[in-house]
């Protein structure tokens, strides 16, 4: 679970979770600095009520941090990915494609929020132009 202070995409509650659905893995596993890159995840901001708790996993670290060799992390999915399994094997996608996929999910989430009447999101003209 990663913390942050934004609003849930489905309501006005503070978003405490980011969707962990895996969109893909980087085309190049390692960056220019030689460090391995993380998988691209959906990252949609949701509150506890609008997140689907998928489970808790133990993350093992290759070296100890603060005297610990691992930690527990929760896996949560947004409404758009509720009940969905991340694709296996994880497809390789580019940064641009990951961004595009995230945007599609965000638009779907906004439409769902509007349909339910919970969150009237005023869309700026700039946003509209950006779509086409
Ligand atoms: Zn919510
Ligand atoms: Zn998601």
Image: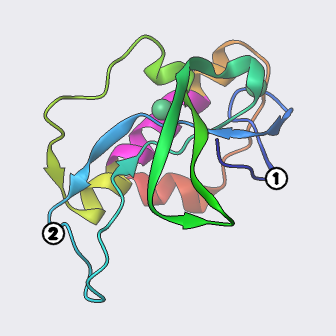
Read off the magenta span.
101-110
**Does residue 31 appear left or right of residue 72 in this picture?**
left
Residue 5: image tag: 1
**Residue 111: quarter of image:** top right
Q: Is residue 105 magenta?
A: yes
Could you tell me which residue is drawn at 55 percent across and 64 percent down?
A: 64
Q: Position of residue 48 (x, y in %)?
A: 75, 25
| Position of residue 109 measured from the top left corner of the image (x, y, whole percent) | 56, 29
Number of the label disc, if any, that sits on residue 28: 2
Q: State whether residue 106 is above or below residue 93.
A: above
Let me know if residue 4 is in the magenta part. no
C-alpha gap between disc 2 and disc 1:
31 Å
Total marks shown come to 2
Q: Quadrant of the N terminus?
A: top right
Which corner quadrant of the image does residue 45 belong to? top right
| Of 5 and 111, the residue lying toward us | 5
């Amino acid at each position: 679970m990663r913390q942050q202070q934004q609003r849930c995409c489905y309501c006005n509650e503070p978003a405490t979770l980011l969707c962990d659905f895996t969109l893909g893995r980087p085309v190049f596993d390692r960056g220019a600095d030689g460090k391995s890159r993380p998988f691209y995840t959906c990252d949609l901001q949701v509150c506890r009520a609008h997140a689907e708790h998928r489970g808790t996993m133990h993350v093992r670290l290759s070296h100890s941090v603060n005297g610990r060799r691992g930690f527990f992390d929760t896996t949560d999915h947004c409404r758009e990915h509720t009940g969905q399994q991340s694709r296996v094997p994880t497809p390789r996608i580019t940064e641009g494609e990951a961004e595009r996929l995230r945007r599609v999910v965000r638009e779907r989430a906004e439409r769902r929020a509007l349909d339910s009447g919970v969150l009237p999101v005023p869309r700026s003209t700039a946003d509209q132009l950006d779509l086409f």
